[in-house]
Amino acid sequence: MLDRPTTIAPDILEVSAVRKIYQASNGPVEALRGVNLTIRKGEFVCLLGASGCGKSTLLRIVAGFEKATEGSVTMYGFPVDKPGPDRGMVFQDYALFPWLTVRDNIGFGPKHRRVASKVVDELTDKFMAMVGLTAFADRYPHQLSGGMKQRVAIARVLSNDTDVLLMDEPFGALDALTRSKLQEELVEIWRTTGLTVIFVTHSVEEAVMLADRVIVMSAGPGRIDCEIEVDLPRPRDVASPEFNVLRREVTQKLTSHIAGSRGVAADS
Ligand SMILES: Nc1ncnc2c1ncn2[C@@H]1O[C@H](COP(=O)(O)OP(=O)(O)OP(=O)(O)O)[C@@H](O)[C@H]1O
Ligand SMILES: [Mg+2]
């Protein structure tokens, strides 16, 4: 399997000096401070950090669901100030439409944008096949397993012709085997489509398995501590010595900043 040469790709997203303050009932909460991040087109980036370090906040700002208090996010040089089909989000809890079938969930975005119904059908068939759900086209979300629901969520974003796939702990609720299968499938989709992926996780192992680059964040206020290039060939083998060297390095970087904090699966 060939890796994609993302190191020479142009920048797609730029996060500059982002600060986020939430007004909570017991006073302001500074969720992010001074966050700078450049994402190259086609890159697979994992945001890794302890609970509360602002990973979801950063992702939501990039998605346009949340506004930065200070600083800016640009995509292809244009300011991001609202959600758009060019940035699709996949959540841990699937967020599917329960009253729509697999087919209609996947076709929802293009249909909503008044794409011709023949094209909607073609897009739906294409992405349903890509995530292996063609045989389940007429099922409803409650008739699917967690892994299948997450496949629908991914296909639903892809059918929007999205450039950047934003994933907030998407496999966190799945059993280990299903999680590992979906990781493999996601890498295959990423490799074949040219998508840019920003993937939030607590798990060092998941980050090293998936990412070209791991961005380590820490809390109080949320910030980026360091980043680590993962130059292991794909498919990656968790049992290989090279994988373990990187897993240890990332774990050390993570724990040196958040010693004693809860909520991180250092899993090594
Ligand atoms: N809507 C909100 N109002 C007030 N505070 C918030 C809000 N959303 C998040 N926060 C606070 O901002 C900080 C960052 O939260 P965020 O959810 O981004 O962290 P996270 O890294 O995604 O955590 P987790 O790993 O648990 O999902 C936390 O202190 C959180 O309590
Ligand atoms: Mg979160």
Image (cartoon, rainbow, N blue to C red):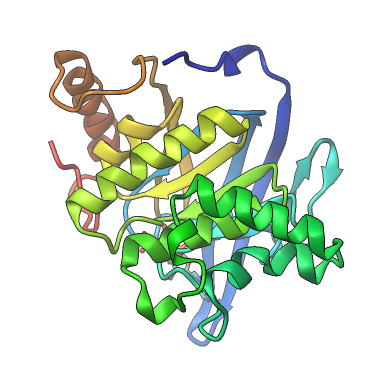
Above or below for 24 versus 85 = below
Q: Name the side, left or right, on which 122 lies relative to 33.
A: right
Please name the residue shown 29% across and 37% down the image: 254
Choose between 203 and 130: the one closer to the eye: 130
Please name the residue shown 44% across and 41% down the image: 186
| Residue 258 percent location from the top left of the image | 27, 45
Q: Is residue 32 visible?
A: no
Please name the residue shown 29% across and 64% down the image: 173
Above or below for 54 versus 99 = above
Q: Is residue 125 visible?
A: yes
Choose between 265 and 101: the one closer to the eye: 101
| Residue 217 percent location from the top left of the image | 42, 43
Please name the residue shown 26% across and 60% down the image: 174
Placement of the N terminus among the 4 image quadrants? top left
Give the mark count: 0
- Among the 4 quarters of the image, the one containing residue 100: bottom right
Placement of the C terminus among the 4 image quadrants? top left
Q: Name the side, left or right, on which 246 lies relative to 210.
A: left
